Image (tube, grey):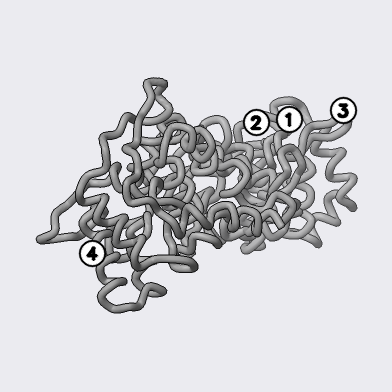
Amino acid sequence: MKRLARKLAGAAAIFSWAVGCASIVGIEDNTFDAALPPSPMCTEYCDKLGEACKAKNAVYSSREACLGLCARLDPGNDIEPDDNTAACLKKGAQRAIDTAEPETHCKEAGPGGAPNCGTNCRTWCSVLQQTCPKEFGAMPDCARACAALKDRGTFDLDTDHGGDTIQCRLEHVSNASANPTAAKTHCPHAALVATEYCQAPQDKPPECAEFCRFNMAGCTGDLAVYESVPQCMAVCTTLDRGLNGHREENTMGCRSWHTFNSLIDPGSHCGHTGPGGDGHCGVDTPDATGNCASYCKLAQVACAADFTTKFGSEAACLVDCSTQPDAFGAKHDSKYRIATAQTGNTLQCRLLHVSRALSDATECPSALGQGMCQ
């Protein structure tokens, strides 16, 4: 019903664009950049879309959103209409008219421009910077963050109103471009760590492939917590996946939330995405630590026979790990990093080697406190 209500409410805006639309006005509160009246290029582009791309082929929620996004693109030129430019998008809209194939060419003339007019990421980063400076400024590197987002490969106005994709963020940054009021509503939806619409279903488990792609983008160099995608996938599929809405539980859902935030503040969040959870995903209790719970689960799976010989049970492993001296580093905020976990009698060393042991049994001695971790 909510989806139907949204579609009905937006129908007039999508199908009845007024040709004499008022110019877009900015405000001086650093939430929406001041804009000039629509250029002839943008007016022509949006006119052509209004003519060719209607109903199920529409690519903007309103003419004002079309004009607003277009105004924030490089205008380009009609002689060589390419890259992320208004001229290239206009050419795509004209192609939809000339071929009478709107189902194919309207999507190509949509807000991202991909694949014929540059890239979705370039458009999203550029328009977000101008329209939603707060959301843009939260990311140290917009291009790197965007590269981790899921790309559905095509654009559909109705489908992409929701979903954890670059297409959803493009739709909402387009809507935010319409006017200051729209910016206040849609900028949070267009952000990397989006609210409401452009996020994974909070009551569903995370996808390991999505988690690992984000983690490889956000936690790099000295902050890396997985050595490779296969290692990340092995840990993810061994631990409880939980739900995307988790924030403290010892699940991959909680780690996924911190992985998103690692693209904003890697120093604070990368450790929480690692195999132990760092006491943030799997909080410490008076009798046990979250890091130990994760370690014991991974060790029991990776090194079953040796684990039984050493500990006997997962519960006994948890007691042994949680009662180690503070220097063992089992408690929260241990700052797990690949770079500092190679050797030593620490839980961080065991976590690194047990992550390796999930695919290489020769790592089990170190994972259980011998070898490199004694």
Q: Amino acid at mark 2?
A: Ser
Tell me which label, 2 or 3, sits earlier in the chain: 3
Would you name the residue on which mark 3 appears? 286
Name which residue lies at 57% across and 57% down: 210
Q: Quadrant of the C terminus?
A: top right
Does residue 112 appear left or right of residue 92 in this picture?
Answer: right
Name which residue lies at 85% across and 56% down: 308
Q: Which mark is residue 331?
A: 1
The image quarter in which residue 246 lies: top right
Residue 280 in the image: above or below residue 172: above
Would you name the residue on which mark 4 appears? 91
Name which residue lies at 30% across and 42% down: 72
In contact (CB < 8 Å): disc 2 and disc 1: yes
Q: CA distance from mark 2 to mark 3?
A: 17 Å
The image quarter in which residue 116 lies: bottom left
Would you name the residue on which mark 2 appears? 334
Which SS class for mark 4? helix
